[in-house]
């Protein structure tokens, strides 16, 4: 009795009037959905991707990526450049795998011209493409840890990246944009002692890769945040045109190095790692295993690389690709990077469509995000490895 | 299937699917009439022999001489490992193509991109808004009559000119007489460049 008197003194309106608490189950109470902007400056977006998400409490009900902040009109620009200039141009869409981009352009020009490439040049291209793939994957191994709150993997990644970049710089002169390919071959031969150094670096990288495994793959916190989070089924991935490590993590062993070998990938042995669940952890794990496979390929290249010229002796001053259209795809670091070239026989392409892996991979985000909670958003978004320049071109 | 088999198979299923076809560098292209565009796409995805389960990309190609825009949808089958270009040509002025986004989810963004860059409308598309370009952008930048923005700001005097090649005499072949005036100009500027250096040295 004394209690109610006290309460009525506290809440002047009398019992039940001052403070009313309604406990309602889901659906009884009208709640508003909230629209939240993630980015374009959010660290997990690796650049300027903006994701507009609709929230019901903490549950994401819809997600819409907003892209185009880095659209630089490469496809338009390519129509005003000749083929050698285009090689410098395509270095820049996926800046983390510049060599992988440029090798595709060189290959499609050679294919349409029917140009014979010296074997040494092809082997060196493979070597560089694989080192570039490792560079790219190391970046994402490091940054994914960072996004989940683990700082050390980033430092480890840059420790290795620095040495690989120095190696590639020795041959190409570039650390980010290599511009090492030419239609028909390569700009320069490898410097003296390159292969020995490369061999040493393979051993070192393989050894240090165990650090990442120890830090993240067996880490209970890391597993709790990634296993079963953001599951992408294989057939949905294919429907969206998703390729690369993300498709492989969904259990589809599609890799154009294996299914449609270009360069000399048919002469080396390697496996395509696949995941079984298609969740964030699998995507990360596939990325990790792809580095191991790349190291395996590099070791075989060291044994097979022949002596000889790196570019055919006589190359025309202006390259005119014969009339026609062709699509050539390569397995770039983040997925299938292809070029659809329409030529009218001019020295410039009539149309060059850049089919970049990140564009298709990011277009899948509206499928992946709904149904997960906000705290998992970064874990999922970070595991859709993409480069914004590669999305926007 | 080989490219030849693919084309033959499509013709066998429905002769009206294939308007014409060609094989270039070992890659098959089929031109599909507008009213069969979605039906052909559905067949290509669902037929067990074709099994085009991956929508790879879509590209537009401008052909101003024919006053047409070509839309190319490139398909790939992960299961069967073969490629196919689905092509359709539409008028430049008010061209429209039925959407494939109900067949492959991946077509959604590619159609938005083709729409904003070429001005081809995709009928029945669920969300046809700008993707890469800002909302206020006017024009279709990948058409040949759209100049590079830098060229709009300043006329390019080099030999590379965007747009249809050889449609007009190329500007920029600098005649000899202008070379003389240029030499005079550079002489004057070098004299100006020397003067400040003397001033700097004076104190």
Image (cartoon, coloured by chain):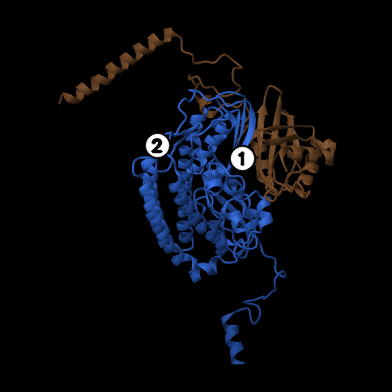
Quick check: do tags 2 and 1 share a chain?
no
Secondary structure at numbered mark 1: loop
In the rendered view, does B164 fall on the left or right side of B159? right
A321 vs A30, nearest the viewer: A321
Q: At x 74% / y 34%, what residue is drawn? A: B88
Q: Chain of mark 2?
A: A
Checking the image for residue B135, the label placed there is 1
Give B68 or B16, whichever is nearer the viewer.
Answer: B16
- Image colour for chain B is brown
Q: Nearer the viewer, residue B189 or A298?
A: A298
Residue A39, position as x, y percentages in the image: 53, 52
Crowding at dot 1, Cα within 10 Å, few <14 / some 14-19 / many 20+, comes out as few
The reply to whether callout 2 and callout 1 are in contact (CB within 8 Å) is no
B181 on left or right of A217: left
> Which residue is denoted by mark 2 in the rendering?
A189
Q: Specify the quadrant of the image occupied by residue A280.
A: bottom right
User: Is B10 located above or below residue A113 in the figure?
Assistant: below
Q: Which chain is assigned blue?
A: A
> How many marks do you count on the picture?
2
Residue A304 lies, in percent from the top left, at: 46, 45
Q: Which residue is drawn at the image coordinates 71% and 24% (left, top)? A: B67
Question: Toward which corner of the image does residue A326 lie, by quadrant?
Answer: top right
Q: Which of the chains bears the disc numbered 1?
A: B
SS at badge 2: loop
């Amino acid at each position: 009795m004394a209690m109610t008197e006290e309460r009525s003194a506290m809440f002047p309106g009398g019992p039940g009037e001052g403070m009313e608490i309604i406990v309602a189950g889901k659906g009884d109470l009208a709640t508003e959905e909230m629209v939240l902007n993630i980015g374009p400056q959010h660290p997990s977006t690796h650049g300027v991707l903006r994701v507009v998400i609709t929230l019901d409490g903490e549950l994401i009900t819809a997600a819409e990526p907003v892209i185009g902040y880095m659209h630089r009109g490469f496809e338009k620009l390519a129509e005003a450049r000749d083929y050698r200039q285009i090689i410098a141009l395509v270095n820049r869409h996926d800046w983390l795998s510049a060599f992988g981009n440029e090798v595709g352009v060189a290959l499609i020009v050679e294919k349409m011209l029917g140009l014979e490439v010296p074997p040494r040049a092809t082997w060196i291209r493979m070597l560089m493409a694989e080192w570039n793939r490792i560079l790219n994957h190391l970046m994402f191994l490091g940054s994914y840890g960072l996004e989940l709150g683990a700082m050390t993997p980033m430092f480890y990644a840059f420790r290795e990246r620095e040495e690989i970049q120095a190696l590639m710089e020795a041959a190409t002169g570039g650390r980010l944009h290599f511009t090492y390919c030419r239609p028909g071959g390569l700009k320069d031969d490898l410097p003296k002692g390159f292969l020995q150094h490369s061999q040493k670096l393979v051993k070192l990288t393989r050894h240090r890769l165990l650090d990442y495994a120890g830090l993240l793959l067996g880490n209970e916190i890391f597993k709790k945040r990634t296993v079963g989070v953001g599951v992408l089924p294989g057939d949905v991935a294919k429907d969206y045109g998703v390729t690369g490590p993300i498709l492989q993590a969904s259990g589809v062993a599609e890799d154009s190095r294996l299914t449609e070998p270009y360069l000399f990938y048919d002469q080396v042995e390697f496996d395509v790692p696949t995941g079984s669940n298609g969740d964030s952890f699998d995507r990360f794990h596939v990325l990790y295993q792809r580095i191991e496979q790349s190291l395996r390929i590099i070791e075989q290249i060291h044994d097979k690389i022949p002596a000889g010229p790196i570019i055919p002796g006589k190359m025309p001053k202006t390259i005119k690709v014969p009339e026609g259209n062709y699509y050539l795809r390569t397995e770039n670091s983040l997925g299938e990077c292809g070029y659809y070239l329409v030529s009218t026989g001019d020295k410039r392409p009539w149309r060059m469509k850049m089919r970049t892996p990140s564009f298709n991979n990011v277009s899948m985000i509206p499928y992946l995000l709904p149904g997960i909670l906000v705290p998992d958003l970064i874990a999922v978004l970070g595991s859709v490895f993409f480069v914004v320049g590669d999305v926007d071109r | 299937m080989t490219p030849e088999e693919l084309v033959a198979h499509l013709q066998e299923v429905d002769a009206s699917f294939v308007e014409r076809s060609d094989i270039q560098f070992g890659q098959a292209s089929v031109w599909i009439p507008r009213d069969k565009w979605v039906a052909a796409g559905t067949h290509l995805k669902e037929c067990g022999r074709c099994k085009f389960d991956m929508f790879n990309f879509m590209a537009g190609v401008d052909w101003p001489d024919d006053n047409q825009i070509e839309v190319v949808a490139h398909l790939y089958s992960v299961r069967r490992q073969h490629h196919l270009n689905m092509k359709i040509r539409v008028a430049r002025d008010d061209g429209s193509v039925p959407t494939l986004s109900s067949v492959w989810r991946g077509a959604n963004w590619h159609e938005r991109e083709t729409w904003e860059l070429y001005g081809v409308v995709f009928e029945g598309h669920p969300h046809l808004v700008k993707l890469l370009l800002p909302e206020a952008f006017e024009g279709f930048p990948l058409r040949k009559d759209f100049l590079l923005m830098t060229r709009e700001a300043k006329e390019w005097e080099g030999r590379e000119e965007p747009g249809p090649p050889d449609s007009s005499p190329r500007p920029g072949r600098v005649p000899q007489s202008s070379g003389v005036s240029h030499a005079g100009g550079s002489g004057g500027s070098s004299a100006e460049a020397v003067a400040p250096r003397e001033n700097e040295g004076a104190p």
